Image: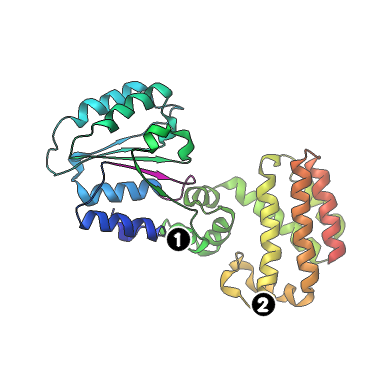
Amino acid sequence: MGFEKILGHNVVIKALTRAIESNKVSNSYIFEGPEGVGKFMVALATANAIAYAADIKVFQTDDKTIKVEEIRKLRMDINIMPYQSERKVYIIRDAEKMTADAQNAFLKVLEEPPYYGVIILTCNSINSLLPTIRSRCIVYHFGSLNKKDVKDILIGHGISPSKAAYAAALSGGSASRALMIATSEEFDSIKEIVNKIISHIADKELLKSVEDVEQLQDKQDFIDDILTLLQLWYMDLIYAKLEMYDIISHVDELDRIKSLSRELQMSSLVKSIKLIEATRERVNRYINFLSAIEDMVIGLQELR
């Protein structure tokens, strides 16, 4: 994979491209940022730009830790000259998994790296690495992806545009989280319940909307996503009032959203979003989440 196929992170990619083209590639990098935003993909693209496959090695594990034995293997291997390339690239994925012993062993690699060696660490938080490791690496920070890029990535994975839009809106800028949402039956179920709640609020059927809430009994682990989905509905209604149709998340409900937005006052929509956010704060204070949502639904109905 090359840089041209990666969405987002233009500043980082431009800096890396300049370094590669001017033959000023460093021996060590840290790619730091939220999970699922593309750090590993950029690391692979960097490796492919400076070395052939035989001289690229990836260290990753499904275990909770990267043990010192793995780093010792790296230390031995890096002293062997490249097979086909001028460079030899090592990617340590989720480098924060390195144990204290592993990090200390890795530090010895950084202290005297061979001229041909390039090591790229990816991690969610640079603070998980020893200061002595951080000080010896060029650090690039990866921010969250924008919704459009996440949506385009999902569509590239065969997800429908409508599902990609709402998954991107819920993803927090993480492509991997968006893909999980878009392919999860659990999220499909939650979205269906939330849509029913909105529909019954719109039709002024309070009892039915409260009954809908009861279907969320076993969804407490997803409370933040439930509230975010509700907020997305009201944000879409605001966007429709402003005729900003291109950024609406529920593109499959566009006609209905347009119709509803004409019935509601902007002030009511803003108050509804504030009510949902207040409910989020109540739930975070360990108030019974079903009771909190029922109270919220009653409040949303009154604002209707």
> Does 113 sit left or right of 170 as displayed?
left
Nearest to the eye among marks 2 and 1: give it.
Answer: 2
Q: Depth check: 17 or 24 in front?
A: 24
Q: Crowding at label 2, few (<14), some or many (≥20) Cα neighbours within 10 Å?
A: few
Q: Earlier in the sequence, mark 2 or mark 1?
A: 1
Q: Nearer the viewer, residue 277 or 162?
A: 277
Residue 129 drawn above or below residue 191: above
**Residue 68 to residue 179: above or below:** above
* Stretch in magenta: 28-38
- Return the residue at label 2: 242
- Would residue 29 be counted in the magenta stretch? yes
**Which residue position holds label 1?**
155
Q: Label 1: state its secondary structure.
A: helix
Residue 59 percent location from the top left of the image: 32, 33
> What amino acid is found at the position of numbered circle 1 in the picture?
Ile
Q: Name the side, left or right, on which 298 lies relative to 181.
A: right
| Total numbered labels | 2
Asked if the magenta segment contains residue 249, the reply would be: no
- Residue 191 lies, in percent from the top left, at 65, 54
